[in-house]
Amino acid sequence: MPGSQIKDMPAHKIGRLWKFQISEVDEWVRGGGASSAANPERADGCR
């Protein structure tokens, strides 16, 4: 999650790695967390 592209996404940083617990991510998505995240344009022009 470099640069905090997705704010408030449930994740835990262990060393250089980001770890996600699937149940926490599922709950976050169902709660609308994914729709409230910023949607920056990708470098390749796709959205």
Image (spheres, rainbow, N blue to C red):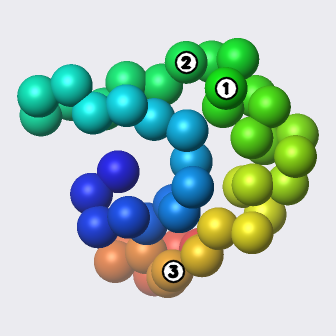
Q: In front of the other: label 2 or label 3? A: 2
Residue shown at 51% from the left, 61% from the top: 6
Kind of residue at disc 3: Pro
Which residue lies at the image location 75% right of the left edge and 55% below the top edge?
Answer: 33
Near mark 1 (Cα within 10 A), the count class, few <14, some 14-19 or many ≥20, is few
Contact check, label 1 and label 2, Cβ < 8 Å: yes
Q: Secondary structure at mark 1?
A: helix
Residue 39 shown left or right of residue 41 in the figure: right
Q: Which mark is residue 21?
A: 2
- Using a 10 Å C-alpha cutoff, classify the residue at mark 3 as few (fewer than 14 neighbours), some (14 to 19) or many (20 or more): few
- Horizontal arrangement in the rendering, residue 32 relative to residue 33 (left or right): right
- Residue 24, picture quadrant: top right
Please give the residue where the numbered disc 1 appears in the rendered image.
Answer: 24
Give whichever of 47, 6 is nearer the camera.
Answer: 6
Residue underneath mark 3: 40
* Upstream in sequence: badge 1 or badge 3: 1
Around disc 2, counting alpha carbons within 10 Å, would you say few (fewer than 14), some (14 to 19), or many (20 or more)?
few
Marks 2 and 3, how far apart at CA: 24 Å
Tell whether 9 sits left or right of 12. right
